[in-house]
Image: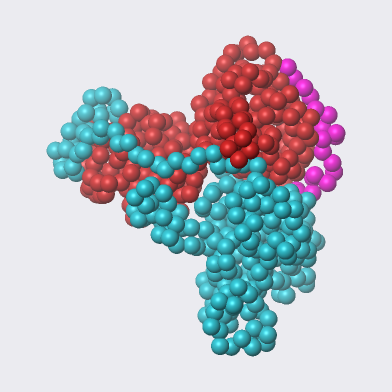
Amino acid sequence: MKAYKIIVLAKQVPDTRNVGKDAMKADGTINRAALSAIFNPEDLNALEQALRIKDSFPGSTVTILTMGPGRAAEIIREGMFRGADGGILLTDRAFAGSDTLATSYAISQALKKVKDYDIIIAGRQAIDGDTAQVGPQVAEKLGIPQVTYVEEVQKIEKGKVFMKRRLERGVETVSCPIPLVMTVNGSAPDCRARNSKLLMKCKHAKTVTELQNSNEDYLHLYNDRPYLNIPEWTVNDIEVEQAELGLSGSPTKVKTVENVVLQAKDAKIISSSDNDIDELMRELIESHTIG
Amino acid sequence: MNNVFVYCEIEDGQVAEVSQELMTKGRSLANELGCQLDAIVIGSELDGIEKEIYPYGVDTVFIADDKRLYPYSTLPHTSIIVKLFQEQKPQIALMGASSIGRDLGPRVSSALHSGLTADCTSLIIGDHFDKKQDKNYENLLYQIRPAFGGNIIATIINPDCRPQMATVREGVMKKEVVDPKYKGKLVKLEVAKYVSEADFVVEIIERHMEKSKVNMKAAPIVIAGGYGMGSKENFQLLYDLAEVLGGEVGASRAAVDAGYVDHERQIGQTGVTVRPKLYIACGISGQIQHRAGMEESAQIIAINTDPEAPINSVADYVITGDVATVLPKMIKYYKQNTK
């Protein structure tokens, strides 16, 4: 049976779904420190699809590729606890300020260095931007087909992946030859939980930078157990045109950012007492808003 | 040349609602810029479709008609648009933020190295002065959208790359026929010149499309629940009230993410935009992305235990209290006081 080399594109994101009151500073700017950094939810759905392929085709490998600051290595470890074989952290100040196009350029250049891949799986979109653009743009830059909104990988046969897509008004089954990029919907099965054995095995996995900054007593382990080393790639490790990276490589620019200031309407404040609710309903019926 | 372009999505042989809305917006942008509005339709059996399109004020309708081009598939549609845009050099290109537009848009923008902004809630024309380059840009497309979990509103521009691309969700823009007799012209593309065999490697094996069961856009009353509803079971109260009042049930993203309700009921920037006569927000805190999808409702009632909830700022009536107590009272009064 054939084994597949699967790359999962994942992103560490601020948890914008749980923005508490302390997430905004007094001056109206975002207090990033108050938002926890999490594995982008749909990227976890993507990881699950990757792990399922690995389950069905023993010998397949799952590698997480993420671009971000040093601490994004956390999601590579998180992925390894759930069954990924390892990951690559793409990190460099030169990537700062990248829009989706500059991001997909950097990621596609990293994938060209990986070279040996069959299936690239990403979440449909990341919750910090909700753009759903990086997956298709990576596919275009690699010159391979894309299948978006995937809910389930049904089978892989004769070099083709069969997938169910979840669209607004229904489902579609498609087949696509390998290699391809697929993006996975949040409606796909949740990612399996951490595996305690894998947690013990991989919890010390580190990037070079993390290793330099740690007081690891067992440095020899990193020679004996190569899987503990998370490769860290900078612009020097991949072939890139500097002008295509970061702000200069981004056709879109943020012109202005406004904090959301609420100017309250003159709302009628009412209680949940019988009298108040009856009065409200009477008003609504009288004005023909209802009824 | 340098026109405004709209990609027309086709559903069951008809121009999709979102595309009609975008042509309306495109017409007003073109008027402001003093250029033409063009549309591209890709599909099969499209004879006469241009007659549905001209009335929105479209000057040129490009049609790529081939039986292999419907249903939508990424690669052939991308190839046609990329080549056509290289020939026509539009300054602005608009697509629906649907599963088609959000699949196609990024692929096209990557091929053309042009910027794309997803899920815009407003599009306006404006200038930009770049201090670093000491350069003034006139008549750029401001692509405005909430970002970062809705805590900020960002205005995005593409100063140097063309076309300036944006996707917009259905319902965000209003559709309007400019002139039922508007005179446009038709250009039929020779499909073979635009696509190659390699564009057809992805095969559609099966398709089950349904007419959407919920039609929140047309509902006069929308009763929407948020994370504060607490559970899927508690949503039943909303269905009860909706049935009594003759409305439709909607939800915030948090409620959809929590699994209380299906995605098709999601209201907001990444869901549907509604403008009902009456909107009742139940246990919804009211992040900007949600408000973007409902704040134009004629009347808004917010029911929330948190007197400080942001939703209250757009509400006409604020009920500080528990949804589980308030809704049954509303149902009871209504039943007793109407025939």
Image point 43% across, 60% down: which residue? A33
User: Which of the two residues, A39 or B130, is positioned nearer the viewer here?
Assistant: B130
Q: Colour of chain A?
A: cyan
- Look at the image and give the residue range highlighted in magenta: B185-203
Q: Please identify the residue farthest to the left as the structure is shown.
A: A275
Percent from the top left, x then y, of residue B88? Answer: 76, 28
Which residue is at a point 24% across and 41% down the rendered structure image? B319
**Residue B218 is covered by the magenta coloring:** no
Q: Nearer the viewer, residue A98 or A243?
A: A243
Let me know if residue B126 appears in the view: yes
Q: Residue at 67% of width from left, 71% of height from top?
A: A231
Residue B260: x percent and y percent? 41, 53
Which quadrant holds the C terminus of chain B?
Answer: top left
Quadrant (top left/top right/bottom left/bottom right) for the N terminus of chain B:
top right
**Image check: B334 left or right of B130?**
left
Q: Is residue A18 above or below residue B4?
A: below
Give the image location of residue B324, x and y in percent: 26, 49
Query: Within the image, what quadrant is residue A155 found in?
Result: bottom right
> Relative to residue A202, is residue B330 drawn left or right?
left
Quarter of the image for residue A32 reads bottom left
- Picture quadrant of residue B85: top right
Residue B37 point in image, percent of width and height: 66, 22
Above or below: residue A67 compared with residue B236 = below
Chain identifier matching the red colour in the rendered picture: B
